[in-house]
Image (cartoon, rainbow, N blue to C red):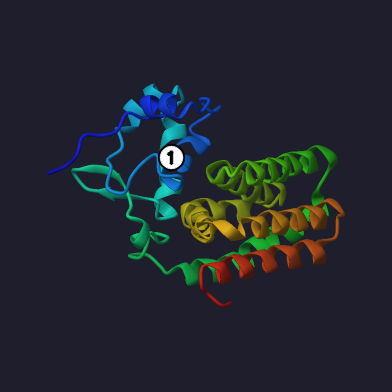
Amino acid sequence: MTSDPVNLSELELANRTPVPRGIVEHIQRLILKGGLKAGQRLPSQRELAEQLGVSRPSVREALTVLETMGLLTVRAGSGVFVAKSNARRPLWRYSDRCTPADVYEARLGLEGYAARLAAARIDKPAEERLRRCTNSMHEALKAGDVISLAVNDTEFHDLIFELSGNPVLAAMYRPVRELLVESQRLPMAQLDRLSETVREHEAILEGIASQDPDTAEAAMQSHIRSAAGRYGISL
């Protein structure tokens, strides 16, 4: 029998935890620290947004990240449930289209060259936009906020394609963006290695900010190889 969904606002009050700025660390903290038990069903996205006082797109983003990390499972027709700890593993939702290794290989070429072009064309306002992402990732790491880290990770990579200044490269990116974003999240299931992700993005930023295309491209490709390695793929 399917259990009734838990009321997260009541759990939050019971735990005396302040309501966060977004859904960000709220659900992940409850799962990782036991406030939500394995097998419990979450409320609908609409109900979650109302309980937590955040937007539905924020809820949707949070649930997607948590599902990718293997903390939540979606059962068609039943809802979203907390995964059992012994069954938690990263989820690849595009197995009918390609493998994660296919995506990491493509990213080496696409994102490496995008970083190279961005380094040749960067200006101060654009650099500050990238730096805001890495600063936010660093703060998220300190707060143990995996969802915020993932969101800023995605924004960082989106910006690099934008800052490459090449409309053809940007057009090649858009149709496969969902695959690339998903591959960024897979290694985040390795919670004890999140600091590596932040350091790698800071290295990419410094290569781009220093207007050194060789360094920027190498830093991006090193990051992608390392991210693949954290997921168990050797490039």
Residue 100 placed where, x, y %? 46, 67
Q: Residue at x 55, y 46 (%)?
A: 146
Quarter assignment of residue 206: bottom right
Task: Give the amino acid type for the residue marked by disc 1 in the picture.
Answer: Leu
Q: Residue at x 80, y 37 (%)?
A: 125
Depth check, front residue: 160 or 69: 69
Quarter assignment of residue 212: bottom right
Depth check, front residue: 66 or 97: 66
Depth check, front residue: 54 or 161: 54
| Residue picked out by circle 1 | 30
Q: What is the quadrant of the C terminus in the image?
A: bottom right
Residue 122 placed where, x, y %? 81, 48
Q: Residue at x 45, y 22 (%)?
A: 53
Q: Secondary structure at mark 1?
A: helix
Q: Given the current orientation, which residue lies at the most extreme bottom position? A: 234
Q: How many marks?
A: 1
Image side of residue 82 versus residue 153, left or right: left
Depth check, front residue: 54 or 180: 54
Picture layout, residue 173 above or below residue 46: below
Q: What is the quadrant of the N terminus in the image?
A: top left
Picture layout, residue 200 above or below residue 26: below
**Badge 1: how crowded within 10 Å, few (<14), some, or many (20+)?**
some
Q: Residue at x 32, y 28 (%)?
A: 7
Residue 27 placed where, x, y %? 44, 38
Q: Given the current orientation, which residue lies at the most extreme left position? A: 1
Picture layout, residue 194 above or below residue 155: below
Image side of residue 125 versus residue 221, left or right: right
